[in-house]
Structure formats: C-alpha cells, structure tokens
C-alpha cells in the first residue's frame, strides 16, 4: 500500500514537473517570437525616420542651389555642400538599414543613383557660374530640365515609405497576434498548474514548493508581457510623431512655393511697368501697385514665419487687455462685416499682461477673420477676457504650461466647428482647410508662435456643428500698467519730416538698401550721410562734428551694427541710435524680446514707416513741441 502511494506520488511529481517545463518552454518561445515582431516594428519606424531626414536634406540642397544661382550669394554654396554631404550619408545609412529586404534594397540603390544624377546637374551649373557663365547657369535652372529626375527621386521615396508602412502594419499585426497567443498560453498554463497544485498539495510538500516556483515564474513572464505592451505603445506614439514631423518637413516646400508666386508678381509687374512707363503712365502705375502688393505679401509671410519660429522681435509693455479689445472693437466690426453679430465682453478689474500690443492686435484680427470665414451664412462672434488660474492638474495634461495666474482672451464663434483631426493640426504651419489661394495656413501658427514667445499658452475648443473657441493665455504681470497714450495713438495723418536741419548717418553693406533709405530720408528733408560698413562710418564721424541719429543695419561683414553702436556710444554719446534689420541678432534681442532701450525698424519698410520711426527716436527725451 505504502509502495503504491510512493509510485503514485512519483508519477504525480513527474507529471507536475513536465507541465511546469512545458509552460516555461512555451513561454520562452512565444516571448522571443513576440520580441522579434516588436524589433521588426521598430526597424520599420527607423527606416521611415531615415526617409524623412533624407527628404529634408534633399530640399536643403535644392534650396542652396536656387539661392546661389538666383541671388548670387556664396553663402548658399556652403549650405548646398553641407546638405549634399549629409544627403549622401543618409543614403548610405538607408542602404544599411534595408539590407534584409531585397525590394527596399533595390529601391535604395535606385534612389542613390537618382539623387547623385540630380545633384550632378547642380555641380555642372556651379561650375558654369564659377567660370563666369552665371547667366547660362541660371537659364539652365529656370528651364527645369531636371524636374523629371527630381520627381522620380521623390516618387521613389514615396514608394519606399508606402512599403515601410505596409511592413509596419504587417509587423504590428504579427506582434499583437504573438502577444495574444502568449497571453492565452500563460493563462492555460496558470490554470493547469494551479489545478495540479491544488490536487497535489496534500501529497507532497516538494511538489507544492515546485508549484510555487512555477507561479513566480509565470508572474515574471506576465510582468514582461505588460512591459512589452507598454513598449509597443511607445512605438505607436513614435509613428504618430513621425507623421506629424513629415507635415512639418513640407514647410520648406511651402515657403518656396509662396515666395516664388510673390516674386513672380513683383518681377513681372515691374518689368511691365518699365516697358509702359513712358507711353502709358496709368497702366505702369497699376503694375507698380501690383508689385508693391506682392512684395508686401512676401514681407507678411516672412513675419509670419518668424512669429511661428518664435524669432519675431517683440517690444512688450504692460497693459490692460480689456482696454485693448474695447479700442479694437470698431476696427474688428468693420473687418468682419455686417453678416456677423459681433460683441466684446471685457472683464472688469482684469489683471495686466506684458506683451507686444501690435502682435496681439494682429493675432486678434487674424482670429476674427478666420471666424468670419467659418460663418459663411452669418453667425455670432464674441471676444471676452477673464482672469484664470491654470493649476497643476491642467499643466499635467498640457506639458508646455507653467501653473500660475493668466489672463485669458477668448475668441468664440458659432461657425461650422472643426473635427478632431483638423483641430489637432490647426497650429501647424501651411496647414489650411481653405480653398487653394484663399489662405497660406500660417495665420494660426503665427498666433501660436506669438503667444508661446510671450510665455503663454494657446488652446482650441471645437467640434463639428458647435463652433470654435480659441483661448489665448498670457501670464499675469504684477508691475505697473503703461499709460494708454503710449500705445493707443492713432495713425499719422502726414509723414513727419526733419526739423532744424537734422543730420542722419545711414550704414548698410547692401548698396541698394542703403541708397533707398538715403533717398527716402532726403525726401523727408533730412541731411543724410552714408557709409557701407562700420569702419567707414567711424572714419566719417571723425570729420563730422554733428550727427543727430545713426541708422545702421545689424548684420554686416567686419564690424557689425551692434559693435558700431558700442563704439559710437563711447565716442559720441549724444548721437541717437536706430537699428534696421530683417532678422535681428542676439545682440539686440534677448529671448525674442528687444533689449531695454533698443529701437528697431524691421526690414522691409515703407517710407511712412521709416519716417515715423526716425521721428520717434529723434524726439525721445525732448520736451513736447508747443
């Protein structure tokens, strides 16, 4: 009897051990299969990221080619060389990444040959330009004979991306299937082991101990399963980020498209005006107006790009946003037209904010125009202000927000609203749902860039059929508020000119820009001196006993504008200073804000803008005229 029980115990023990071994072997096998599927998913993501980086390098190389041949600026050659070398490096890395896929390997070889052929044409054009045949090189570029090659290169990239997307989906499905099989296997093994353990506990302590070990191992495997599930979620998040970055990668193409259209208007209109100025002055004037419109659109696009990139130089002051929207209400009402029921709801006792008034006005006009366009049959538009506190809970779901006190400016309409996929991309540059030619897609991105550069936060609430509310959160300012007269002045009725034979020294290394400023200032009655650089300006000042204002560019070869201003302040502190720049450097801008006491005239500028800014700087510190 005892022997029979011992034999039964041995059989039970061996059966239990066999079951545990089978569970462990199956778990290891399925776990490794699931790991392989996950690694394949990550590999496809890496190839897609490489293709996006490759497209960016190619665009940079082509922009360098266009910049050098059209503008004649040697700095674009260095940009082209750097982009080309990086492109070839990306192609080599891409070839290494797809070695296990014969189809993608063949496509990578075709892509390498394609881009080398395309950039070979660029090298030939550069050789023509360097040998003095710049016109031939430009004609070759404008003939767009390389367009089929470029399009073929891009088509190969599109095909490779599509193949990688297909592979990603296959690998993702395989990974999910392996995870499901592993989970089912673990559950079955757990049930079997638990059943065996319950039946055998009373027979042998040793068998019970082995069952406990098996449970620990199963729990460990289950923990690994959860870790792999989390890792898959990270991979999917990376894919979404890659898709978003791909749309950002279209930015360079969008800039080139819009600028080429605007330059076509400017160049074509000026050419026609030149041909007709002698015998048809009225038509020539119309063409000049058209060229001016195209140039202003290009300047606006540059301003919008700087605002999106948080590079727009801001001149912030402390003010009451409720007063601002009251002052703007009539202008906004005329802008959006009579079909829209427009109201303002400014809060009383609103906290002050510290921001650039002009940029905030532009942002509100932009949002109101967008709201009007969303209400084709009319509707209701309300601008309101409120004091709000964004707490830690809100900041936890919005990583770019610092908890604290904010002033909220809300622009709410009763329009069609946005679906979720449009709302999520609304702040992206060049993303628009308007018809071709009706919008650049930079309006909301400009608003977003201004608010972020001001230390604030922007958010959109919208749903189809429920309208849209854009919230602009600007940090509360705890200092004094600026007097209203300093930021509510109306437009100039006439151009301010010179007084008492005032003398201005203009410094700019670009001859035509310098001459434009000189001619405009002389037209306004000023006595004007000029110099092509900082060293020449200092030499001129040595023999000039009186100069009232120094108007200087910022970025110049040799001695730049900030170095010149420092020297002039040391030698001639009575001379007032006004910078002009299309892209201010860190010397006059700190964290996107003009340094204290710095006066700036942004390029490009009109004669009216030049006149007003020069008069403002000359009159600073003077008693008002009686």
Image: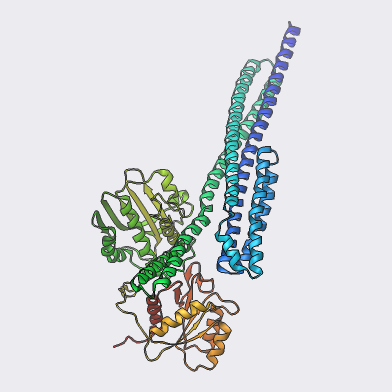
Residue 423 image position (x, y, % from top left) = 41, 47
**Furthest-right residue in view?**
3
Screen quadrant of the C terminus: bottom left
Q: Is residue 537 above or below residue 63?
A: below
Residue at (54, 71) in percent of width and height: 586
Q: Pinpoint residue 229: horizontal percent, then vertical percent.
A: 58, 36
Residue 192 point in image, percent of width and height: 62, 19
Is residue 508 visible from the viewing direction of this image? yes
Disc tally is 0
- In this view, 332 is above or below 535: above
Quarter of the image with the N terminus is: top right
Q: Nearer the viewer, residue 329 or 23?
A: 329
Which image quarter: residue 36?
top right
Residue sitting nearer the eye, 318 or 264: 264
Q: Position of residue 515 (x, y in %)?
A: 48, 80
Q: Nearer the viewer, residue 397 or 36?
A: 36
Residue at position x 32%, y 46% in the image: 416
Horizontal side, residue 187 vs residue 371: left or right: right
**Residue 296 sits in quarter:** bottom left
Please tell me which residue is depicted at 43% across the width and 69% down the height of the picture: 270
Work out whether residue 454 can be spotted: no
Residue 151 is left or right of residue 291, and the answer is: right
Q: Is residue 270 left or right of residue 142?
A: left
Q: What colour scheme has been applied to the protein in the rendered image? A: rainbow
Tell me the residue at 46%/64% (across/down). 263
């Amino acid at each position: 009897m005892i022997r029979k029980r011992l034999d039964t115990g041995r059989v039970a023990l061996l059966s239990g051990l066999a079951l545990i071994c089978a569970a462990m072997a199956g778990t290891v096998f399925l776990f490794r299969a699931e790991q392989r599927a996950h690694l394949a998913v990550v590999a496809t993501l890496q190839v897609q990221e490489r293709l996006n980086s490759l497209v960016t390098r190619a665009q940079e190389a082509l922009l360098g080619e266009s910049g050098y041949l059209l503008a004649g600026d040697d700095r674009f050659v260095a940009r082209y060389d750097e982009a080309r070398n990086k492109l070839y490096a990306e192609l080599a890395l891409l070839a290494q990444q797809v070695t296990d896929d014969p189809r993608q390997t063949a496509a990578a070889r075709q892509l390498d040959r394609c881009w080398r052929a395309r950039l070979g044409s660029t090298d030939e054009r550069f050789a023509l330009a360097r040998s003095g045949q710049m016109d031939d090189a430009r004609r070759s570029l404008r003939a767009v004979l390389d367009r089929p090659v470029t399009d073929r290169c891009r088509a190969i990239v599109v095909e490779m991306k599509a193949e990688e997307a297909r592979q990603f989906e296959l690998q993702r499905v395989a990974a999910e299937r392996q995870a499901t099989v592993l989970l089912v296997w673990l559950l079955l093994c757990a049930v079997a082991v638990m059943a065996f353990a319950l039946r055998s506990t009373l027979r042998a302590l040793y068998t019970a101990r082995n069952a406990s070990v098996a449970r620990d191992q199963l729990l460990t495997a289950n923990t690994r399963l959860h870790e792999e599930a989390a890792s898959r979620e990270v991979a999917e998040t990376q894919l979404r980020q890659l898709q978003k970055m791909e749309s950002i990668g279209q930015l360079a193409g969008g800039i080139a498209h819009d600028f080429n259209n605007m330059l076509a208007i400017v160049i074509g209109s000026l050419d026609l005006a030149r041909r007709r100025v002698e015998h048809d002055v009225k038509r020539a004037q119309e063409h000049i107006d058209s060229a001016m419109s195209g140039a202003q659109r290009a300047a606006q696009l540059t301003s919008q790009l700087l605002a999106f990139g948080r590079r727009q130089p801001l001149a912030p002051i402390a003010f009451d946003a409720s007063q601002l929207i009251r002052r703007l209400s009539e202008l906004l009402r005329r802008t959006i037209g009579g079909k829209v029921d427009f109201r303002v709801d400014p809060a009383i006792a609103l906290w002050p904010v510290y921001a650039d008034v002009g940029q905030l006005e532009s942002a509100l006009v932009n949002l109101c125009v967008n709201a009007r366009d969303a209400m084709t049959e009319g509707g209701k538009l309300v601008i309101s202000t409120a004091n709000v506190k964004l707490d830690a809970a809100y900041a936890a779901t919005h990583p770019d927000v610092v908890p604290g006190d904010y002033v909220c400016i809300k622009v709410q309409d009763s329009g069609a609203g946005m679906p979720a996929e449009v709302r999520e991309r609304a702040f992206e540059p060049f993303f628009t749902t308007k018809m071709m030619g009706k919008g650049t897609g930079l309006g909301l991105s400009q608003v977003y860039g201004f608010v972020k550069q001001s230390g604030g936060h922007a958010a959109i609430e919208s749903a189809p059929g429920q309208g849209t509310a854009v919230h602009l959160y600007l940090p509360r300012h705890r200092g004094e508020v600026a007097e209203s007269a300093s930021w509510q002045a109306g437009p100039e009725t006439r151009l301010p000119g010179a007084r008492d034979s005032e003398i201005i020294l203009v410094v700019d290394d670009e001859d035509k820009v310098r001459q434009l400023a000189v001619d405009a200032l002389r037209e306004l009655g000023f006595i004007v001196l000029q110099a092509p650089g900082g060293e020449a300006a200092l030499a001129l000042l040595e023999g000039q006993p009186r100069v009232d204002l120094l108007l200087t560019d910022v970025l110049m070869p040799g001695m730049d504008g900030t170095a010149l201003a420092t020297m002039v302040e040391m030698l001639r502190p009575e001379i007032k200073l006004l910078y002009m720049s299309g892209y201010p450097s860190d010397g006059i801008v700190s964290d996107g804000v003009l340094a204290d006491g710095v006066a700036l005239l942004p390029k490009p500028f009109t004669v009216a803008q030049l006149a007003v800014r020069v008069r403002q700087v000359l009159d600073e510190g003077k008693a008002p005229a009686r």
